[in-house]
Amino acid sequence: MKRLEVLFLMDPLERIDVHKDTTYVIMREAENREHSIYHMLPGDLYLDAGRVMGRISKVTFNAGKGGNDNEKWFCMGEPEDVDLSTMDVLFLREDPPFDMEYLYSTYLTGFIEREVFIVNSPRGIREANEKLYALNFPSIIPEYMVSSDLKRLKGFMTSVGGTMVVKPLDCCGGSGVFVVHSEDRNMNAVIETVTAHGAKQILAQRYIPEIREGDKRLIVLNGEAIGAVLRVPSAEEHRANIHVGANCLKSEVTERDREIVRTVAERFAEDGIYFAGLDIIGGLVSEINVTSPTGVQEINSLDNVRLEEKVIDFVEQRAPQYFSLR
């Protein structure tokens, strides 16, 4: 197997929580197989005379995971400007929000998509807004409405039994997500806040009471479910995000999960969505995460597996298909 040049376009390494971060274990597994690992910040991507360039640094890892002192786990080489078409693999792992700068980075990296194996496809990332992409699969999602109009949203809430979840379209990690009840005196204020007084479209979904039992994160790789973890909200929360206190419990990939994956697999393949995280509540998909899906370390710990091995296996299989196109 040829040693690969693997570039990660992502946030600063200093921000990584090595005990939870999915990108971290993917990087370590790639290095364990003697591939060369590079890091680049989104702001260091540019186009010059028709070439997609980046100011990148080689990354090496120190023994152990380190602790709070991140200098103990990685070393950065001197940055250099490189034609990114010379890379073998590019992981796009920048965290949301998906703003205009994020959008522009997908256009630039899209110019080298025929020469470099990119996970996930820049075009696919543009297509797959993490709140809206699931709406392409109506048979596996709860009832929903996308609107900025208070009256229309209240009418939808009535039609689904008087309780709904409202979500901004451009946030992540549970930010700006509210459960709204028809008898809540703050209902109007909440909707006005999330819609910026009617200036922003939001996603409203029927409230799924099974959220109290947990939100399953299903990891999908190349159209196959490879692992799952159940995130259970804390007693005072409706959000099942880990960073707001959700507990992670062992979970299995069920036949319903496989049915869901079969439903999305063809579209994922068309859009170049190779690595994704599906959020499933009560057997229904609430969101599809494609920018920097997480959950691998939690699944590894609970199931005594190393899902990152499957990720790098897949990359090693697919990347050589691009070499002849250079």
Image (cartoon, rainbow, N blue to C red):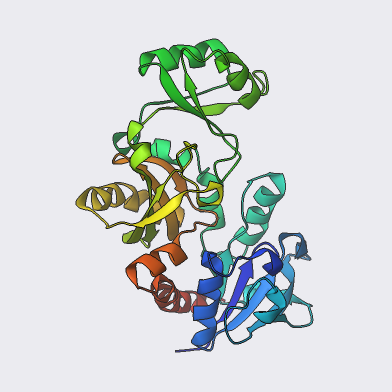
Q: Position of residue 259 (x, y in %)?
A: 24, 49
**Quadrant where the image shows the C terminus:** bottom right
Looking at the image, the residue that sits furthest to the front is 235
Looking at the image, the residue that sits furthest to the left is 255
Say how many tags the image has: 0
Q: Is residue 87 visible?
A: yes
Q: Where is 137 relative to 206, above or below?
A: below
Relative to 101, 259 lies left or right: left
Q: Position of residue 155 (x, y in %)?
A: 45, 11
Q: Position of residue 165 (x, y in %)?
A: 47, 28
Instruction: Determine which quarter of the picture holds residue 138.
Output: top left
Identify the residue at horizontal 61%, vertical 76% (top origin).
87
Q: State the residue in front, 54 or 60.
A: 60
Q: State the residue in front, 108 or 188.
A: 188
**Quadrant where the image shows the N terminus:** bottom left
Relative to 113, 230 lies left or right: left
Q: Position of residue 142 (x, y in %)?
A: 35, 31
Q: Is residue 270 visible?
A: no
Q: Where is 289 relative to 250, above or below?
A: above
Identify the residue at horizontal 44%, vertical 76% (top origin).
312
Q: Where is 113 relative to 95, above or below?
A: below
Q: State the residue in front, 39 or 213.
A: 213
Identify the residue at horizontal 68%, vertical 81% (top origin).
72
